Amino acid sequence: NYLSFPRTKQKPVSTEPEPLTTARFEFKGRFKQQTNLEANLLEIIKNIGVTEAITMKAASEILPTLLSLPTTLHETIFNPHATSHELLVLISALSLFWTLIFQILHKTLTPYIQRQSWLKEAMGREYDRVGVLMCRALSVNWTRDRYIEIMVRDWPKMQGIYLQHFVGGALCLPAVLGWGDEGRAASLACLGVLSEMAWELSDMADIFITRSMTSDGKERLPNKMVAIWMIHHSMTLSLGLPLVLKYRTLPELHWMTFNLQWAAAIAIGMNEYTKVLDLNKSKEFWTFRILNGVAFVIMAWMRGVHWLYLSGRLLSIWYRDEEWTFMLIGSVVCILITGFNFVLCIMPFYKKMVKFGPSQKGVIHNDQNHEDDNTLDDAYNRS
């Protein structure tokens, strides 16, 4: 018993409510062994008038748990025998962490970018180049101004996405490069898997909230775009936790996690930068060419050639181990992600590389009339 109450004689019933501060508590047993921090927190709760016995008992149980949470999560990360329940707690904590990071980016970057004309100009050029085709593919009727408004609003989120992918891929570096203790390296790589899973859960919640609770949610996130995101999230959400539980030390798992996340981080980062480049300026045009070529090579290897090899290796391992559930779900997911990689990750960079490669001679400037796009922009539109 955490609390005891002194026995008193029955008092006459009073019509006036007894002040909350008259309740007396005598802390015994476990409270005597609380740390200074825990005792201070409990004293604060007592002083603000929360004097119900059930509340105090709940606080005495919850506070130590919350204060020990960082240690518990650290132990779970490096525990090779962590249970599914422990890993789900870790995923929940990571999901809250990434939600907080994205909210901080949104709150801090939004006021800044609203005052920046360069970003709006860049999104306008992006609309003239590929935005029209994207709107057509998604079956949305966004005007040029509406496209700029949506892209500027989502710009902080894009920065968060490639930051999250960069961190997740970096966690896999010790495992794929053979640095340090193998067990700890494998634990960090699995943390990269769980980090991706946590962000995807957070993103799905954001998609649901945006579509269901905002007036323009379904316009900003049309059905086709949601379908694309669901394909992207399908692999980690369906196979991430089971793979960590059963194949924690598998090199193919570490390499696949590293490739998928760092390819996205590097390519998205480069693509975001190329949006601000003015292709009418020779130096920026060549920068665009180089960065687009590098992004294509990275995507073609990490999400193309090496992805196919690693997928084949995983399927053969599941077949060898007679893991038919993994085989069934994994085969479907691998087909979906392969299509996603080639159609949405590799081909766009390849088309731009072809259109703006060595065959494109020089830079032709725009006319004064905005309606007359230059040859480069026409080529970009066709890509």
Image (cartoon, rainbow, N blue to C red):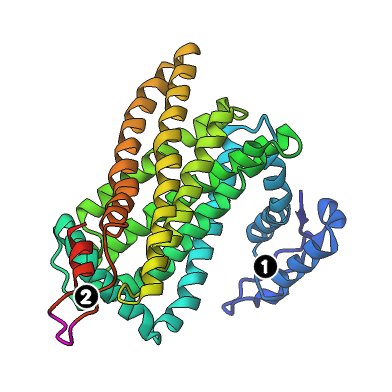
What's the residue at 31%, 36% (across, down)?
A: 336
Q: Main secondary structure of the magenta part?
A: loop
Residue neighbourhood size for the residue with mark 1, other residues' Cα within 10 Å, grouped as few (<14), some (14–19), many (≥20):
some
Q: Which mark is residue 142?
A: none
- To which residue does mark 1 refer? 51
What's the residue at 48%, 68% (across, down)?
A: 103
Quadrant where the image shows the C terminus: bottom left
Specify the segment rendered in magenta: 367-371
Q: CA distance from mark 1 to mark 2?
A: 54 Å
Whether residue 137 sits left or right of residue 270 in the image: it is left
User: Looking at the image, which is closer to me, 382 or 171?
Assistant: 382
Q: Element type at marker 2?
A: helix
Whether residue 22 sits left or right of residue 364 in the image: it is right
Residue neighbourhood size for the residue with mark 2, other residues' Cα within 10 Å, grouped as few (<14), some (14–19), many (≥20):
few
User: Residue 20: where, in percent of width, then height?
Assistant: 65, 74
Q: Label 1 sits on what residue type? A: Thr
What's the residue at 36%, 31% (across, down)?
A: 334
